[in-house]
Image (tube, rainbow, N blue to C red):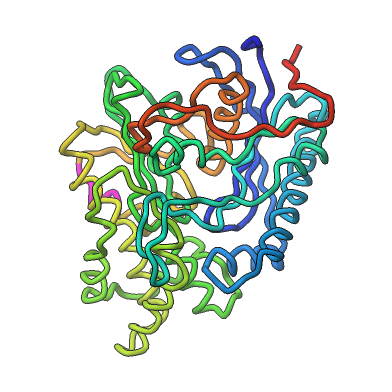
Amino acid sequence: MTDRAMRVLGMMSGTSADGIDTALVRISGAPPGLSAQLEGHFHVPFPPYLRGRILRLSNGAETTTAEISELNFLLGEELGRAAIAACKKWRVPVKDVSLIGSHGQTVFHMGAAAHFQGKVRRASTLQLGDISLIAQRTGIPTVGDFRPADMAAGGQGAPLIPFADYLLYGDSLRGRVALNIGGIANVTVIPAHAQPSDVFAFDTGPGNMIVDALVEWSTHGRAEFDRDARIALSGRTISELLVRLMREPYLREKPPKSAGREQFGLAFAQGLVAWGKRHHAGPADLVRTATIFTSMSIADAFRRFILPRAHVEELIVAGGGAQNPLMMAQLAASLPGIEVVPASRFGVPPEAKEAFGFALLAYETYHGRPGNLPSATGAKHPVVLGKIAQAGKSQPRGNR
């Protein structure tokens, strides 16, 4: 098996469940000499009915094995269609793509054993979107189900994007932190002149998840997110509530750690709505306070866990939260002396970075190389991530 150049499609659907991001990446070589170039990015929104089903399941609603099974296949079909649509958009023949790496849609993730819904639950994770369907619909071998191998090795199964962050942002002179503000916010800390074992990463807490839920509630479903922070900017910060939020136990847990809807999902947002009703707080005030909470929880993670261990000069921001001006302004004000820069400055647009990362992980899996960073996930040792679904009798093809 050689490390010849391959065109790989990376596919990502995040905790916000707003749709599928697809990145086309030309990759060759092997770490530390791996070369990866982004050739295209495409976003396909989920149909409203499908997004509703994903969020319902992710938020812990009662379900059946039949519903979970069906959704797994529906998402597989949707991911396959998205891959074909992306190739059509880029005018790239599907046959020229060697491999697909699909993260799938997370509907449950608990990186460590914890109390959940009144019981002590063991660590587990579940991403839906059957990779065999993707492989058969596209004719392209597909890698998926990346997280369980890391968890089997004692890790939290997250975050996995630090592998890509290290390759993209490692610098011999400047200490950097890569921050992704999706549904959940996560950081990768890359000290100057870092080796892979020097990199550490963790989920800081909520990203856009709480804000999005409050926006959907306050607009009765007419809006899914706070575009340009318009709602938040029309409200005021509720100091009493912000103080309560900053006491959330998760913020004090030491890394490695990972979070999801289990900590900051619909139930959390409903608690804020109930608090607002008791204290006569307006919807815009709740949205603004949740927005500020997201930024301050990230800054709190810097003070507690990052700055004591690493000198940081740059904060590289990606994810939907990077488009929220209030969130970004609060973050910059909370981290004086650290330059906040967009991920697009490094050749990969913020909205494409996670899909780009799963293309890299799929490439490494195909070549039988580990893709986790134990210093980021807490795993006992490096492991090859994911499973491969072949497309009939075909094998991945290097581009000629």
Residue 31, percent across and down?
A: 48, 15
Residue 93, percent across and down?
A: 83, 28
Of the pair 281 and 254, the residue shown nearer to us: 254
Which contiguous range is marked in magenta?
331-336
User: Does residue 225 lie above or below 61 as drawn?
Assistant: above
Total marks drawn? Answer: 0
Asked if residue 131 lies in the magenta stretch, the reply is: no
Q: Residue at x 29, y 72 (%)?
A: 237
Q: Is residue 62 left or right of residue 380?
A: right
Query: In the rendered view of the protein, which quadrant contains the N terminus?
Result: top right
Q: Residue at x 65, y 63 (%)?
A: 51
Q: Residue at x 23, y 71 (%)?
A: 244
User: Does residue 363 lie above or below 132 as drawn?
Assistant: above
**What is the chief secondary structure element of the magenta stretch?**
helix
Query: In the rendered view of the protein, which quadrant contains the C terminus?
Result: top right
User: Does residue 122 lie above or below 1 as drawn?
Assistant: below
Q: Is residue 352 left or right of residue 297?
A: right
Residue 85, percent across and down?
A: 78, 43
